[in-house]
Image (cartoon, rainbow, N blue to C red):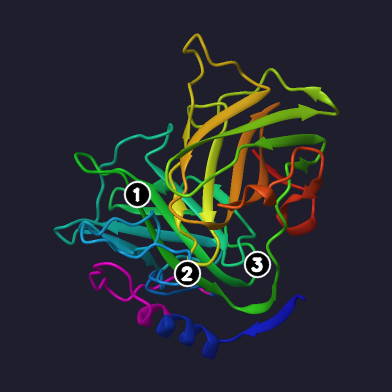
Amino acid sequence: MNTATKLTGFALGLVAVFGAAYGVGQLTDPPAPIVAEGHQAGDGSHDTTAPGHDTPDPGGHLPGGLLVSDRGYTLVPVAAPEGEFAFRVTGPDGKPVTRYEVNHDKPMHLIVARRDLGGFQHVHPEMAADGTWRVASPLSSPGVWRAFADFTPIGGEALTLGVDLTVPGELTEQPLPAPAGSTRVHDYTVDFHGTPQPGGNTTLTFTVSRDGVPVRNLEPHLGAFGHLVALRQGDLAYLHVHPEGQPGDGRTAPGPQVRFGAEFPSAGAYRLYLDFRHDGVVRTAEFTVHVGDPGAIPSPGGLIADEHGTPGHEHN
């Protein structure tokens, strides 16, 4: 059943306290973040010792997004006008990082989702000369959100840092939709094929059709014919998923199929978010998969609506 909860200033304080209590890995203590009006930041760390979740190994290897600070880099939300979200990434010297590699056509990818795995948005902020990244706030409704900054500093390794943010108001928690092999995004149908298992690499294949006709002219989006994000239920571990092939390589067709290679670190429930571009619009198809339980993923044909029971979303 859905649970309505009023998020107040007192609740916001509890979020920050509990965030600090459930630390994972080696965290440095960043400056207390100040965020836009109506947003509150936690420290970004959560307990990953629950069954089915990874624990830090001696080398400190964890899925992305579980830490607010990693390898000397820290994600720091900063004050911003209402309706805007801003942050910096500080480096090992404590100063804002201002030089980044371009990955998937962008130097910075900001992904947000509520803790119930709804509200997914993938946006690309703009950086000012002082290293501050700004974007229209993607936090679209009350709730506890996870924000992921996915980037590679010049001369460094690819990193995904995460921080919790709370938008006050009346929150209605939504259950995770059941696994299904197909979903609708307006007049598009996206079918999913793949049997993820914990551990090794899994090929995930998505087939896009429109009004029953296979789409064979998908448009490049972030350097590929599709972009996929996977989040693990519970701690919202962020998985790096890599597309197979790229536009113009002479072997990758622009649809109707888009393939990815993914490694799922543990058994459990995951939410997959596929962004694809067609007719100049980026649309997002969402799927739930139960890793380690092949019988939980039906063959295409059993449709579910994305975004927790409503039609899928699109953006320019």
Give the quadrant of the C terminus: top right
Task: Name the residue carrying label 1.
Answer: 128
Q: Position of residue 274 (x, y in %)?
A: 61, 40
Q: Earlier in the sequence, mark 2 or mark 3?
A: 2
Q: Earlier in the sequence, mark 2 or mark 1?
A: 2
Q: Is residue 13 above or below residue 154?
A: below
Please tell me which residue is depicted at 61% across the width and 19% down the height of the picture.
254
Is residue 93 rendered to the left or right of residue 195?
Answer: left
**Picture quadrant of residue 60:** bottom left
The residues tagged by marks 2 and 3 sit, at their Cα atoms, a distance apart of: 30 Å
Task: Name the residue carrying label 2.
Answer: 51
The residues tagged by marks 1 and 3 sit, at their Cα atoms, a distance apart of: 27 Å
Q: Position of residue 94 (x, y in %)?
A: 18, 62
Q: Residues within 10 Å of mark 3 (few under 14, many from 20)?
A: some
Specify start and end residues of the magenta stretch as a single range. 19-37
Between circles 2 and 1, the one closer to the viewer is: 2
The residues tagged by marks 2 and 1 sit, at their Cα atoms, a distance apart of: 42 Å
Amino acid type assigned to the residue bearing label 1 in the image: Ala
Please tell me which residue is depicted at 71% across the width and 68% down the height of the picture.
174
Residue 81 seen from this side: yes
Amino acid type assigned to the residue bearing label 2 in the image: Pro
Give the quadrant of the N terminus: bottom right
Q: Is residue 218 above or below residue 298?
A: above
Are dots 2 and 1 in contact, CB under 8 Å?
A: no
Please tell me which residue is depicted at 68% across the width and 52% down the height of the picture.
296
Residues 34 and 195: in front is: 195
Dot 3 falls on a residue whose secondary structure is loop
What is the chief secondary structure element of the magenta stretch? loop
Task: Name the residue carrying label 3.
Answer: 141
Residues 79 and 138: in front is: 138
Amino acid type assigned to the residue bearing label 3 in the image: Ser
Dot 1 falls on a residue whose secondary structure is loop
